[in-house]
Amino acid sequence: QVQLVESGGGLVQAGGSLRLSCVASGSILAIYDMGWYRQAPGKQRELVATIANDGTTNYADSAKGRFLISRDNAKNMVFLQMNSLKPEDTAVYYCNAGVLAVTPSIVAKNDYWGQGTQVTVSS
């Protein structure tokens, strides 16, 4: 099995910064795309940023110029540096990864999610 665990969320004032971290563990053979998504109360989960294992990045328009996604392939980790935070960034942030892993019966590629970390930006 594969687990994704996020950390780094919290309460910050508008204009402040936070750095989210996510580590993948388990019977991992390879990790492909990793990313961050968020879900605000009453809204659908939305993409924030993704990063491929070759470092290619993709950002939502709301994140461009303020957020930076990075990864450490040796440690199976992905990070999200969030700057100039706004109240509308308040949400639960989820880590996502496409992982090739060993299961009891087969080697398979699946999409995995973390449990989420709360980010609250006060005005």
Image (cartoon, helix red, strand yellow):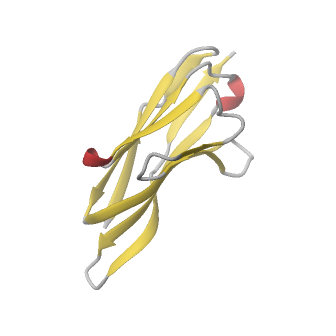
Q: Is residue 24 above or below residue 78?
A: below
Give left or right: position of 55 versus 27.
right
Q: Nearer the viewer, residue 54 or 106?
A: 54
Please name the residue shown 74% across and 46% down the image: 42
Is residue 6 shown to the viewer in this render?
A: yes
Is residue 96 shown to the viewer in this render?
A: no
Please name the residue shown 45% across and 46% down the image: 55
- The C terminus - image quarter: top right
The percent coordinates of residue 122 (x first, y second) are 65, 18
Q: Is residue 111 above or below residue 12?
A: below
Tally the numbered discs. 0
Please name the residue shown 39% across and 64% down the image: 99
The percent coordinates of residue 83 (x first, y second) are 56, 21
Q: Residue furthest bottom?
A: 105
Q: Nearer the viewer, residue 109 or 90?
A: 109
Q: Residue furthest right?
A: 42
Q: Quadrant of residue 108?
A: bottom left
- The N terminus - image quarter: bottom left
